[in-house]
Amino acid sequence: MNSTTKPVNGTARPIDPDRSADPAPVNTGQSAVNTGRGSVNKRPPADDGGKKPSAAVRLVQLARERYRFVMSTDGRPYAVAIDGPNIALPLRGRSGVRQRLARLYADTFEGDVASQSALADAMTVLEGIAEDNDPVPVHLRVGHDDAGTLVVDLGTADGRAVTVSAGGWEVVERSPVLFRRSGAMAPMPTPILVGDGLAMFYGLLNMDESSFRRLVAWTIAAWIPTIPHPVLTLKGEQGTAKSKTAQMVVNLVDPSPAAKRSQPRDAKAWSTQAFNSWALCLDNVSVLPQWLSDTLCKAVTGDGIVDRALYTDDDVVVLSFRRVLAMTTIDAGALAGDLAERLLLLDLELIDDSKRRSEEELDTAFAAVRPAILGSLFDLLAAVLVVLPGVKLESMPRMADFARVLAAVDQVMEWNTLDDYLAASANVAGDALEGDPFGSALAALVERCGAWTGTAAQLLEQVPPPGGIRPPSWPKDATRAGGKVKRLAPLLRSIGITVDDTQRSQDRHRSRLLVLTRTDVPEEAASAPDQGSLWPDVAPIGQGRRTPDLD
């Protein structure tokens, strides 16, 4: 039977030639792609023999009408809504553009569902579009623009942010920099200026004045993304509210549904956590494995991890980050020496049973005053940004950038946070050295001899393990002993012992020598200076978006 075909919804169907054709022509020249009544596509324009565009083509068209596509500096493609918040959306994943496009496609084309292969093809095209543009910075919670203005993402659906510059801050409807979001983030309440937020914050904590002032300085420094931040370490006995304090601090800086976390099991698990949160807290740390101690040190100053891209053999992805870290512990002496140099240790006081409050009561009180606390902290940050460029330190400690922020806080508030920090850092180094059996043995050796020179092998013979039993951290051979001494050198220096490994023996072997020498340590470094009252007689921070008079 002779028959002809006529496309119906894009599919050829045989028809009887004796029957009259439809009275309306197939192609009227009028496009029915977008009728203006809702978002329903009645029928695509017929071309190329009556074939309609594929689902992948339609998906790409829908995406390009609504998003612009960028590539981040770490090589990840993102989509940004053209008429929406300045938020970078990943192309794939639970909260990515892929899911949004799948729903938009079903809404637009009368319930027609795009196949997985069509979505995959569309994502590949969109990734290629993103690669056509130069990489752009994509920030997480905290960023800054080219003028140096700090920007804090409130994490709300409307994309509002707080901008802080020298002299003031404000809440803006659209962020001036590009932010990405993660499932580990929670919205931040809008900061307000009501009363003295710092005094409200202090009323929730059980630490002394010196510790609270350093905590305030650390908190505002946590919103300066261009500097390394020491690891906030809250130490105290059981029942001193270490975990609750850490939770409140993290939820000020970078609110999260999981503000407190357990130690990661490996480097990959850590990198995933660090990539998705600006501020992290490891709760109830007793002993840190060496790999994690080294990883935390790198995360303080800036770290990067290269991994194989999913479903590829030779492509890679880069996770680069500098993070704000916190820990809670009962004993900080077990921490490794290189990490001990990067700690801000705060001791929490015991809570009297008559003054102890329930978690529900603390949560309610914190939620009520958190907007005011944020307002006062942003006010203080704006004032610090005024004086920070002119701060010069007589000597540069290990965390020099953070020390400059402390000096700027002291200038604004007439506090002594820098002196307290330096004194406490020396004490932390001493505690960490006592917690290392090999380091303690070296210190005892130099105390007896005043100075010691020899090879690493001779050093192992000179300092036998305590009780004849070698602890797990004790070096097993001369090579490991030499490396261990280098790792302990900063801690030894903090108690007045210098390490020199540049000399060689005079015999034909030219063996590397270790020279341990005792030096004098000023007594005043062992204790913190006297503190005045918590709230000195100066203009309080929190009187508006103007910088206090610093003259």
Image (cartoon, rainbow, N blue to C red):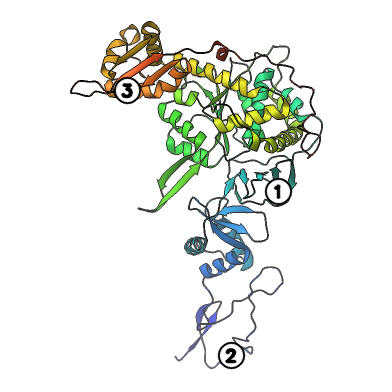
Residue 336 in sight in this render: no
Tag 1: amino acid: Arg
Q: Quadrant of residue 350?
A: top right
Give the class, few, some or many, for how many residues have Cα within 10 Å of label 1's Cα (few <14, many ≥20): many
**Residue hosting label 3:** 482
Marks 3/1 in contact by CB < 8 Å: the verdict is: no
What is the secondary structure assignment of the residue under circle 3?
helix
Q: Quadrant of residue 420?
A: top right
3 vs 1, front mark: 3
Tag 3: amino acid: Gly
**Residue hosting label 1:** 160
Marks 3/2 in contact by CB < 8 Å: the verdict is: no
The residue located at (60%, 57%) in the rendering is 80
Work out which residue is located at the far left of the displayed protein and give it.
Answer: 508
The residue located at (71%, 19%) in the rendering is 357
Tag 2: amino acid: Ala
Q: Is residue 531 left or right of residue 497?
A: right
What is the secondary structure assignment of the residue under circle 1?
loop
Give the class, few, some or many, for how many residues have Cα within 10 Å of label 3's Cα (few <14, many ≥20): many
Q: How far apart are marks 3 and 2 (CA)?
A: 93 Å
